[in-house]
Amino acid sequence: MALYHLNNHNLRGAMILLGEGSNRLRRYPSEYGGIDVDELLSQSAALLKALQQTEPEKIAALNLGQDNTLLLPRMIKVNNEKA
């Protein structure tokens, strides 16, 4: 939902939901449901920090997901296969 708000230029809503989502992710183990939760949390925290430090006008001018100014969080699958 945070990225939805960010895409609609609702910076405040995006930051609130990124913070809340990050707090919820901290309750999960490092790997959960085949997802690297630690990496997702790290990426989400980096985006939140970037949003907090960037002027709203600059964020509004970005083409989210298509330029590398703000890297959007991505879920990374964990390989749990045992050798």
Image (cartoon, helix red, strand yellow):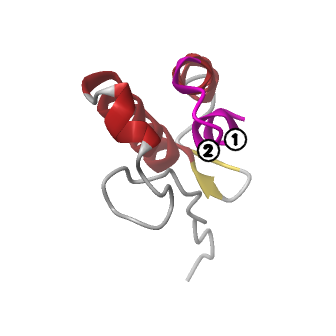
Residue at 63 percent of width and 31 percent of height: 28
Q: Main secondary structure of the magenta part?
A: helix
Q: Residue at x 32, y 38 (%)?
A: 58
x and y, in percent, of residue 7 in the image: 61, 44
Of residues 82 and 77, which is closer to you in this image?
Answer: 77
Look at the numbered discs 1 and 2 and tell me whether their residues touch, using CB distance below 8 Å.
yes
Give the amino acid type for the residue marked by disc 1 in the picture: Tyr
The residue tagged 1 is 4
Q: Amino acid at mark 2?
A: Asn
Instruction: Answer with the quarter of the image where residue 71 lies.
Output: bottom left
60 within the magenta span = no
The answer, for residue 46, to whether it is visible in the render is no
Q: Which contiguous range is marked in magenta?
A: 1-12
- Residue 49: x, y in percent? 32, 28
SS at mark 1 in the image? helix
Q: Which mark is residue 7?
A: 2
Residue 14, image x and y in percent?
58, 27
Residue found at x 68% / y 59%: 34
Q: Is residue 63 above or below residue 9?
A: below
Residue located at (33% from left, 22% from top): 52
- In which image quadrant can residue 80 be found? bottom right
Side of 83 relative to 57 (left or right) = right
Viewer-side residue, 72 vs 21: 72
Q: Residues within 10 Å of mark 1 (few under 14, many from 20)?
A: few
| Closer-to-camera residue (79/38) | 38
Q: How would you rate the neighbour count of disc 2 (Cα within 10 Å): few for under 14, some for 14-19, many for 20 or more?
A: some
Image position, residue 35 (x, y; %): 63, 55
- Total labels: the figure holds 2
* Residue 71 appears anywhere in the view: yes
Magenta highlight on residue 4:
yes
